[in-house]
Amino acid sequence: MIRVLVVDDSPGDRQWLAGLLSRSPDYEVITAANGEEAIRLVNEYSPHVIVTDMLMPGMNGLELVAALRRAFPGLPVILVTAHGSEDLAMEALRRGASSYVAKSWAARRLLPTVHQVAEAAVQRAKISQLNQYLQHCRFSFSLASDCQLLKPILNFVHGLLECLELDSGEITRINIALQEALSNAVFHGNLELSSALREEDEAQYFALAERRRKEPPYCNRRVYFRGELSRQKLEFVIRDEGPGFDPSVLPNPHDPESLECPCGRGLLLIYSFMDEVSFNERGNEIRLVKRLAEKGAREQAGVGPRDAPEETPVR
């Protein structure tokens, strides 16, 4: 069982969020009415994931993220954002939260988001330590456009990041950024599927993806994923063989209102969790950089990844 702690000062919203999670038999849900109670319950029940509202009296969501990051650095926190809390949520993502769900989309997005974050956290706990003396490595994959390959690829990267002795919460955020970028390459790049279709009919979206995966020209396209990792810097490059895209039509990843836009969710997470994000001219290749040498200095200063230029958004 995956234990999920839901934190919300509104009894109605708290019961609603807990009910959404209780639809899955894999989750044991406990609740807290405020940040102080949440920290007590973390000590008592050791939950695997925290789901918290942002606007609460006393300790708000941002302060709860900071407190949990200090006391329980490997514990992932998912933010539930309502209209008016976007700026606070953006700062919480920079400070260490693992993901977010807009409250207006919680009925559809909460369970998949908790599953994504919980799975990453559980995998982190299960993977044994590899060579702790690893200093530098490179890898390169040529992948079919099959979403079933994403989990083993991310597990592979996860193991390498553990060898580099990264903070467990940082590993989870890097994996989520890579999952978003790889999913973009498969679904939006090679299979040419739109986010609008997914929001209209998710079942139809994945059914079309499965059909296209077996039909030309889509079935012949590959996703190229390479990485270079050291104890100073991580660099990942993901390229698809689709037609590319026009970045000017995409939402601004630095705008807090993007939290309410389903199509901009992956974009916002990638920019929040990586230090550099850039694209090739065609728009079918993304480069992600995480600078590890500056990690300690950034945490002491209380700031997140550097702002990326607005002219290079992602699908």
Image: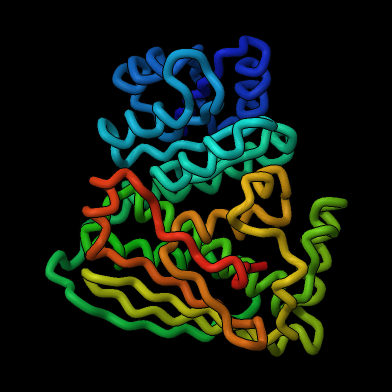
Work out whether 26 lies above or below 289. Answer: above
Given residues 224 and 64, the one toward you in this image is 64
Viewer can see residue 290: yes
Task: Pinpoint residue 149: horizontal percent, then vertical percent.
Answer: 55, 70
Answer with the quarter of the image where residue 248 lies. bottom right
Given residues 286 and 86, the one toward you in this image is 86
Answer with the quarter of the image where residue 263 lies. bottom right
Q: Is residue 208 left or right of residue 213?
A: right
- Asked which colour scheme the image uses, the reply is rainbow
Task: State the residue at coordinates (74%, 34%).
Answer: 104
Given residues 81 and 25, the one toward you in this image is 81
Task: Pinpoint residue 58: horizontal percent, then vertical percent.
Answer: 44, 14
Task: State the residue at coordinates (23%, 65%).
Answer: 293
Work out whether 72 lies above or below 127. Answer: above
Viewer can see residue 118: no
Task: State the residue at coordinates (52%, 35%).
Answer: 88
Work out whether 93 lies above or below 216. Answer: above
